[in-house]
Image (spheres, rainbow, N blue to C red):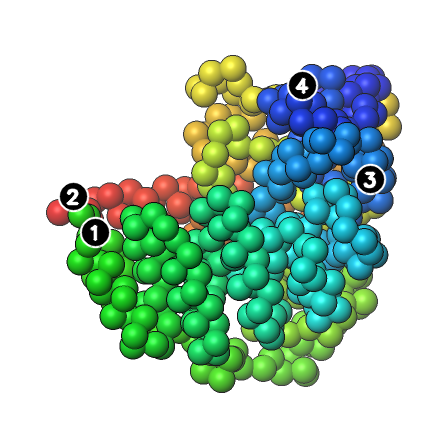
Amino acid sequence: MVDRSPLPARYRAALPATVDGMRAWAQGDPTLPPVGHVVDLLLAGDAAMLAAVERSAARVPSSQVAGWVSAWRASTRFKSGTERYCSRVRSIMDGAATPLRDALSGAYAASCRKPQELASLLRPDTAYWAVIEAYEDTADEAAPPPDHDPLARAALQAIDAGDDDAVRDAAWALAYRAEPAAWASLRALHARISDRKEADQLAMAFFRTRDPQLHALAWSACARMPRQHPMCESGPAPHDTDEHAATPPAVSAADLAAMRQTLAGLGFHRVAGLADARFEAADATSVLAASGYIHGFDAETGQFPNAHDSLLRTLAPLVQPALDGAVFEEQAPDQESGPYRLVAYLDGKRYHMLARNLDDWYDIDAVLRLLNAMLADRARAERFASLHTNDQIAWVVGAPQSALQAAFKAGVLQPGDAGGAEQQGKAFEHAVMQELKQ
């Protein structure tokens, strides 16, 4: 359904600059833009949203800086930014320590790992949690920071702050380092923990080092635990280092060039501008994903509400610039059994559609129907479609409809059911449960 409607005023409201304001915002203050909208645009590197956060940071009372920064840390935790986010925030991270820098540092650490980015990120005046985040595993192939000293320093700061979760994260990051000096720092960190139970929990990280003395301390901790820790069952285990890490075979340049030529001929013109990158396969899905036509994601959200609006914001750029400027929101049901309402605002129009409540699974069909309805209403040539999947990772392609039809006809891409990933995931879960009952 579509009707005429201006963008609600809350999307133009200033972001909160007090601790109470941040708390109300997190709880869904209807006078403020939704948290998901702000965070998604910020991490996408949207210049206007970054400027809005900067204006908010400038208004924070000095007595509330710590609480304001902490609230931003919570809002962006476990999230990562795009390359555009890294590019826009780099000058802030290179500059002096400010509340704005601290608020942006967590996502920067999770996303921006180039040597020049790490140099500013690992400074002594960077928030300890961001430094620790920079050493944790990521999905990309960025090399870990070469020196463990900033990590050890941040771990001690986490102890002083009483941040037990950050201390544990730092301990495991130190344990997985290859250099013995990092293990010595881990032992010193352990010695600073006065609570015996907490110290014994942290000692489980010792099993991931190659230090026999630390292994002995970990076994002693196991003996004191009233309940057996899983690490006490597995014991020491080696961890990979760069020289032992498996390297996927290089894709033939000729095969990759041939696939790019095929896809360009079918109408996927952005593949021509694809920068050189490492591919594990020269298949259409890999090349189109790298070119910004395909997005893969877990169909199971693990949360309620499901944040369909965030998924919509992620998928819309696949057909850029067709849906540029669209604002998406999810209206969650009052009760967990009711339907969702998905809403989009663009150029003075409001599009809305009901989505099924599938527990903690996206209603991908409703998401794609809303996006395609917007494209059709705007007389655009692009469309979205689901691709075949063998597991609960859903794959969505957005491209000119003629290119999609040509790719499906040629067998380069295989269309799939929008609910296929959900069906595969639930089938796997059922099989696991049946096996556990035996």
Mark 4 — residue?
Answer: 29
Give the number of callouts: 4
Q: Earlier in the sequence, mark 4 or mark 2?
A: 4
Q: Quadrant of the N terminus?
A: top right
In the displayed structure, 19 sits above or below 127; it is: above
Mark 1 — residue?
Answer: 225
Q: Amino acid at mark 2?
A: Lys
Q: Secondary structure at mark 1?
A: loop
| Mark 4 surroundings: few (<14), some (14-19) or many (≥20) residues within 10 A | some
Q: CA distance from mark 4 to mark 2?
A: 45 Å
Mark 3 — residue?
Answer: 54
Q: Earlier in the sequence, mark 3 or mark 4?
A: 4
Is residue 76 visible in this depiction of the protein? yes
For image coordinates 66% across by 22% down, the residue present is: 20
Pointers 2 and 1 in contact (C-beta within 8 Å):
no
Q: Earlier in the sequence, mark 4 or mark 1?
A: 4
Q: Secondary structure at mark 3?
A: helix
For image coordinates 77% across by 46% down, the residue present is: 98
Pointers 3 and 2 in contact (C-beta within 8 Å):
no
- Nearer to us of marks 4 and 1 is 1
Q: CA distance from mark 3 to mark 4?
A: 20 Å
For image coordinates 52% across by 28% down, the residue present is: 305
Q: CA distance from mark 2 to mark 1?
A: 29 Å
In the displayed structure, 158 sits above or below 423; it is: below
Mark 2 — residue?
Answer: 437
